[in-house]
Amino acid sequence: MSLSQPTDAELDVMIRARLASIGIDLDQLPAGSAPDPDTGSPGRDSVLASLRGFMRTTVLPLSSYSFAADARLAQQAAPPKLYPSIDVAREA
């Protein structure tokens, strides 16, 4: 299954929801893309544009990565059990 690129509006909703879940409110930043002259805080539009770029160039490529190409890394997709002796006893 190939992933399609989300729209800017979809990314904005996801970014705002994710930041809100950890207590960050982008509405506290000044509107627009120009930084606040008094505090130096970046504008809300420039922050969203930067985070959209990060999502498109980093998160989507990482989410489509597959271990199947390298057998040495495939074992990391299914890590060993913490207590194999207990599981072996149950199976017997």
Image: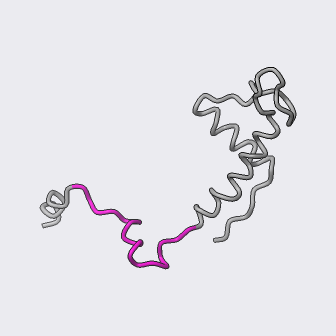
Q: How is the image coloured?
A: one colour
**Which image quarter: residue 39?**
top right
Relative to 43, 22 lies left or right? left
**Against 14, is 22 above or below?**
above
Q: Position of residue 78 (x, y in %)?
A: 37, 65
Residue 73 placed where, x, y %? 41, 72
Whether residue 78 is in magenta: the answer is yes
- In this view, the residue in front, 66 or 40, is 40
Q: Quadrant of residue 16?
A: top right
Looking at the picture, how far across and down is residue 32, in whole percent? 87, 33
Q: Which residues are magenta?
A: 65-82
In the picture, measured across the screen, residue 92 lies left or right of residue 3, that is: left
Quarter occupied by the C terminus: bottom left
Residue located 63% across and 71% down the image: 1
**Camera-side residue: 46 or 79?**
46
Residue 25: horizontal and vertical position, in percent?
Answer: 69, 28
